[in-house]
């Protein structure tokens, strides 16, 4: 997959088959669109192109809104590459760009800059100033401007209607297994391993403290989870705790992963966590011994979940 960080970098190939949107999380609904444009491109001898925007439009248009993203741009790029998209064009989103009328967006971007021959959109796709544009505007201009339009209906995308908002809700409540089902893959977070207070090591459960790479990245609700850990190209098993560590009177929310059968100095390393399922919500124990006993049980539960 070729990545273009600006429209000016992109030279349209023959027979562009396009879809566009923010594509946060790349869930099952998104996959319907991606599968369709790659299929059409193969049938017509064309090339699949996805137009996306970064930063997320809501971050630009409403800075006070606390948006929690399912995927960082790097995570989204990796998922789109895996889906088989040939070209990913990213528009640096700005207020100026948001003021394009639907007609200007279609002519200047879809046709002139991207050279679109076929555009495939979801049933709820909106574009242009105040999101005023949609399917009707595309159909109206498709003939005069020389492109075809195909809509993926609500029922085709998913009988239960998958949405990024729905997935965020489940993940925020710790319902990882439901969020993963809608995503079609395991939810992930990435970051750098930072130095903590090493309390976990003292009780037999050493942890790697993680500083997440994006301030807008969604973090699941407080609790312990069974996880897979990608570190230096190797996939490992573990459990992660998110929360304030009330048993030791923690003051700041932390993200700490205990990697099973692992004892190496990894401070400063990049790490990726793939969430499998919630083990339990965060609770306060009467003493450290009871916490240790629970962590032993949590590890066994995590191992069982990771074997499924």
Image (cartoon, rainbow, N blue to C red):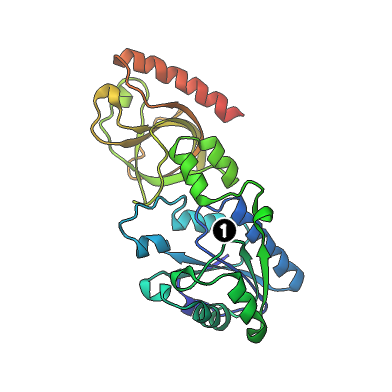
Closer to us: 236 or 295: 295
| Image position of 27 (left or right of 118) | left
Quadrant (top left, top right, bottom left, bottom right) of the C terminus: top right
The quadrant where residue 16 appears = bottom right
User: In the visual, does 169 lie left or right of 291?
Assistant: right
User: Residue at 66% across / 83% down in the picture?
Assistant: 146
Q: Is residue 110 visible?
A: yes
Q: Quadrant of residue 178?
A: top right
Query: Count the marks: how many?
Result: 1
Q: From the viewer's perspective, is residue 65 above or below residue 265? A: below
Point out the residue furthest to the bottom here.
144
Neighbor class of circle 1 (other Cα within 10 Å; few <14, some 14-19, many 20+) is some
The percent position of residue 249, horizontal first and vertical second, equals 24, 25
The residue to which callout 1 is attached is: 80
Q: Is residue 55 visible?
A: no
Q: Is residue 94 above or below residue 223?
A: below
The N terminus, quarter of image: bottom right
Up the image or down, 222 lies above or below 163; here it is above
Is residue 58 or residue 6 the one in the foreground?
58
Q: Position of residue 38 (x, y in %)?
A: 68, 64
Q: Quadrant of residue 39?
A: bottom right
Residue visible at 30% across and 14% down?
Answer: 286
Q: Residue at x 57, y 61 (%)?
A: 124
Q: Regarding mark 1 in the picture, which secondary structure is present there?
A: helix
Say which of 261 and 140 sits in front.
140
């Amino acid at each position: 997959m070729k990545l273009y960080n600006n429209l000016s970098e992109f030279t349209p190939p023959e027979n562009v088959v396009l879809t566009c949107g923010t594509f946060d999380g790349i869930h099952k609904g998104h996959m319907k669109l991606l599968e369709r444009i790659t299929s059409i491109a193969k049938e017509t001898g064309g090339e699949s192109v996805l137009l996306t925007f970064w930063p997320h439009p809501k971050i630009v248009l409403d800075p006070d809104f606390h948006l929690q993203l399912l995927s960082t741009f790097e995570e989204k790029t990796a998922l789109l590459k895996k889906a088989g998209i040939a070209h990913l064009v990213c528009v640096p989103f700005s207020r100026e760009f948001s003021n394009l009328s639907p007609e200007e967006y279609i002519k200047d971007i879809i046709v002139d800059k991207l050279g679109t021959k076929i555009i495939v959109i979801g049933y709820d796709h909106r574009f242009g100033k105040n999101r005023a544009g949609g399917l009707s505007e595309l159909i109206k201009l498709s003939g005069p401007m020389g492109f075809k339009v195909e809509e993926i209906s609500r029922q085709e995308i998913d009988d239960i209607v998958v949405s990024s908002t729905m997935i965020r809700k489940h993940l925020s409540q710790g319902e990882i297994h439901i969020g993963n089902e809608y995503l079609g893959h395991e939810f992930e977070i990435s970051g750098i391993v930072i130095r903590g207070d090493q309390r976990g090591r003292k009780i037999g459960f050493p942890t790697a403290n993680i500083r997440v790479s994006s301030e807008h990245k969604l973090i699941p609700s407080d609790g312990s989870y069974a996880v897979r850990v990608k570190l230096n190209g190797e996939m490992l098993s573990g459990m992660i705790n998110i929360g304030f560590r009330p048993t030791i009177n923690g003051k700041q929310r932390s993200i700490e992963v205990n990697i099973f059968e692992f004892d190496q100095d990894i401070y400063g390393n990049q790490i990726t966590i793939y969430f499998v399922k919630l083990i339990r919500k965060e609770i306060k124990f009467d003493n450290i011994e009871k916490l240790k006993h629970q962590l032993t049980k949590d590890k066994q539960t995590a191992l069982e979940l990771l074997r499924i």
